[in-house]
Image (cartoon, helix red, strand yellow):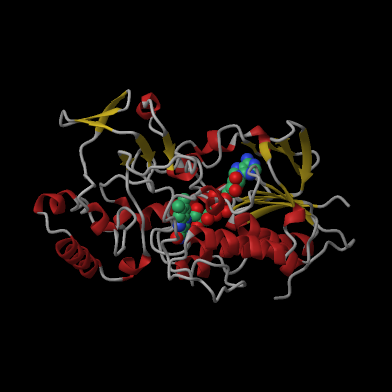
Amino acid sequence: MGLTKTYKDGSTPVVAIIGAGFSGLCAAIRLQTQLNLHTYTMFELEPELGGTWFANSYPGCACDVASINYQFSFEPNYEWSHRFAPQPEIWAYLRRVAKKYNLHEKIQFRTEIVHVEWNQDRQKWVLDYINLATNEKGVLEADIVFSGMGPLRIPQIPKQFENFEGPMWHTAQWNHSIDLTNKRVAVVGSGASNKLIHRLPRAIASFMAWTYRFIQIRDKALRAKLTPDYEMGCRRIVISSNYFPALAKKNVNVHTETITAVKGNSLMLKDGSVQEVDALVLATGFKVQEMIPPKFVIGKDGVDLIGAWGKNPSTFYGVTSSHTPNMFFLLGPNTGLGHNSVLFMIETQVEYAIKAMSYMMENNLSTIQVTEKACNDFVTDLDEKMKDKVWSSTCQSWYQNDEGRVTALWWGSCSQYSRRMKNFHPQCFINTPRKV
Ligand SMILES: Cc1cc2nc3c(=O)[nH]c(=O)nc-3n(C[C@H](O)[C@H](O)[C@H](O)COP(=O)(O)OP(=O)(O)OC[C@H]3O[C@@H](n4cnc5c(N)ncnc54)[C@H](O)[C@@H]3O)c2cc1C
């Protein structure tokens, strides 16, 4: 590929990678294999790598795009037990891959990055971290930062459930110590997805959904409850052979009324009914819009990245921002997908960052910073393209911010994204020459 792998003096940038999920691991592997770069450190606040696939261990947890697409393209696994592999297998796969590339020794586990600030004089990022096991604090200076902090990570727990006086947990924090046999369990929320339907014309997909509902649910009232009142695809689509049958079981009741209050171990519903339960499982999603906390990243000129973005992140293809030189976001704003494996996006973004770093070394640059204009152009084009997409329709989803603007998803296909990100765009970046 003709990448430049060192500066002329033989040195390589110091790189910090935040997070050891698919994103962080991909960045580490590609730095090693494509740039032969080993001057990097990964920080992971959990005691284990894997991100999503370490955190989520609820019964039946699995990927919702076929495993053949939900794996690194450069590390194919021919032994998935299911078309949609279960969580333990995906987590084991990630541990296996990490072992192959000796990544464990590069990861500082149980170490949380708490603050990241750009130092203009030194042309470096200063990362403050804390070891959660020992409370020891530390600082790392890095030339380049990859942020792989994960959009679907921080559980969204509506306040009213905090009053529940019984065992309660979010699906991403499954409590394996409690036996639910013969217990009355409320599961709040539902969701899963699969890309197969997405690939079909929407009319056919809707017809398939209707057919499944008709065949698998004989009770008319239940069927009515399970018939969405929003356009197909505006939320993630579920395709499953056991979803409807599970809901149709005699020991399962489906309530579609809003839960208005929680008292003791009772849930009050909007229709006036009260449900008493022994345990509460919250499948209430994640704080997608809060992937990076306020005042966490202080960029050039002391700008707080999240303060500058507000509810509307402004990036160049979700990967860089005009406030943060030498920083690459993986699965950043507007690069999630509603129809395919996000690993494609992660790999494309890492490749882009690698090309950017190669450009820096080739041209002896200490910084590259995308221009505000490039970000504005990207956002304007994105909003225009998103207008007629189903994700912009009136139904609410986690793809949108609270003003209804889609900030989580890419507007097009994976190949449309990869075509645009195939080559580094030097004309969209401002550079600073290296002093040495
Ligand atoms: C249940 C579930 C199923 C999913 N299924 C699919 C699927 O089938 N297909 C698909 O395309 N996508 C799926 N996703 C989306 C999934 O999140 C991504 O596919 C992918 O795993 C994201 O990887 P990541 O590394 O970007 O983020 P994560 O896996 O979330 O990893 C982020 C890591 O960063 C660490 N971290 C965060 N902040 C800090 C900090 N300040 N300091 C140190 N470490 C930090 C976290 O601890 C975490 O380990 C699913 C998500 C969930 C929750």
The residue depicted at 13 percent of the width and 51 percent of the height is 224
The residue depicted at 22 percent of the width and 63 percent of the height is 209
- The correct choice, above or below, for 163 with respect to 155 in the image is above
Residue 284 figure quarter:
top left
Q: Is residue 407 left or right of residue 278?
A: right
Nearest to the observer: residue 433 or residue 158: 158
- The correct choice, above or below, for 257 with respect to 42 in the image is above
**Residue 138: percent from the left, percent from the top?**
78, 35
Counting labels gives 0
**Residue 217: percent from the left, percent from the top?**
16, 58
**Residue 126: percent from the left, percent from the top?**
74, 39
Residue 62 figure quarter:
bottom left
The residue depicted at 26 percent of the width and 32 percent of the height is 259
**Residue 410: percent from the left, percent from the top?**
44, 57
Q: Is residue 243 left or right of residue 162?
A: left
The answer to whether any part of residue 374 appears in the image is: no
Query: Split into 4 quadrants, where in the image is the N terminus?
Result: bottom right
The residue depicted at 53 percent of the width and 51 percent of the height is 52
Q: Is residue 41 left or right of residue 63?
A: right
Nearest to the observer: residue 78 or residue 352: 78
Which residue in the rendered view is the most extreme toward the left?
Answer: 220
Nearest to the observer: residue 306 or residue 81: 81
The answer to whether any part of residue 241 appears in the image is: yes
Residue 283 figure quarter:
top left
Nearest to the observer: residue 118 or residue 105: 105
